[in-house]
Amino acid sequence: MEQQDGGAGLTKSAAVGACTAMAVFYVAILYSPTLILRLPPPNSFKSFMIRRFVCAAVSSLVSLIVCSLILPIRRRDASNLLWVYGIRVDHIWQALVFPLSLTSFMYTGSFAWKLLSMLQASNEHLNSGGDELVSSFRKFVDWVLSLTSSVSSWRNYFVAPLTEELVFRACMIPLLLCGGFSTYTVIFLCPIFFSLAHLNHLLEYYYQQNCSLIKACMVVGVQLGYTVIFGAYASFLLVRTGHLTAPLMAHIFCNFMGLPVIVSRRSGQEVRRRGLSCQDKRSEICLISNSCICDGDAGLLLDAFPIHKSTFV
């Protein structure tokens, strides 16, 4: 790689090296309590996750501090640094509504599947003489309570999205841009560091879950694939809006929704990791979902650039 800078005193090699170090540090610190500090293994899943929450928070804080020292910023006051990281309050509603609306296009099939499945379940419940409204309300309350009390929910919907967006978007994108990389290069380069931070799952699958090496590689390969795709999308949102809120909300939303529904009209089987099944008697739901998936993908492609024109960056 040529030693070339972006006119701001930061070379491309230095920017890539800093991003690589941040990605490695983000993963390595997760194992530091037992490997470096020699702490006893956690006695429960909750204590294990809390320990990882602390490690991820420390990693994010260190990355923000190091990045502020590396970036060629003239004024290092708090407001200027926060602006560089995309932490802003101006045009906050655009950064919330537009990216969520854009991201929801990918889940049009999922929404259609959920809605039609709920309508069918509601009709079956009404035919059996049950009070669907009261039952649905109770299920919703139970779901909210279980969500707020689950340490896994805190990981998926708060800690992981916040720390990952701070390190892999807020810190890395300004470094790469100041290093002289073009905007589109940054959008497709940044996800590589994001995917490398998930390679530790290969060892976890292979050693802790006793998976075969081939199976572990296949599972992690799929994970790396969609982390690269989402990483590019999240980088695009931050670059186009200048708001860290945009990729953060998209990250939380995608973690909540999971992989978009992909259904097969021929077999009536749902190819998805959420555990739902598309039976033959629901073939009409499959057909509508397939149509909504196509419409959603088309809407995503058509609205991506017009919605996120850099008018409020």
Image (cartoon, rainbow, N blue to C red):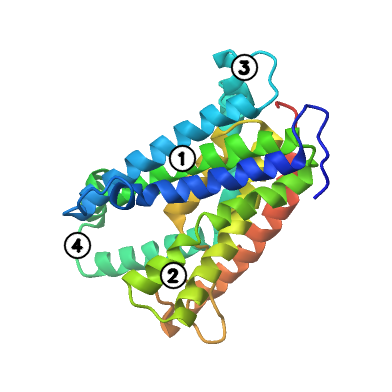
Residue sitting at 22 percent across and 45 percent down?
A: 149
Where disc 3 sits, the SS reads helix
Query: Which mark identifies residue 130?
Result: 4
- Whether residue 90 is visible here, answered yes or no, is no
Q: Give the CA distance from mark 3 to mark 4.
A: 58 Å
Depth-wise, is mark 3 or mark 4 nearer the camera? 3
The residue tagged 2 is 273
Q: Earlier in the sequence, mark 1 or mark 4?
A: 4
- Would you say 296 lies left or right of 117 here? right
Q: Give the CA distance from mark 1 to mark 4.
A: 45 Å
Q: Is residue 299 above or below residue 173?
A: below
Query: Which mark identifies residue 80?
Result: 3
Dot 1 crowding, Cα within 10 Å, few <14, some 14–19, many 20+: many
Q: Return the residue found at the far left.
A: 43
The spot of residue 310 in percent (x, y) is: 75, 32
Q: Earlier in the sequence, mark 1 or mark 2?
A: 1
The spot of residue 42 in percent (x, y) is: 20, 52
Q: Give the CA distance from mark 1 to mark 2.
A: 25 Å
The spot of residue 1 in percent (x, y) is: 80, 50
Q: Is residue 243 above or below residue 211?
A: above
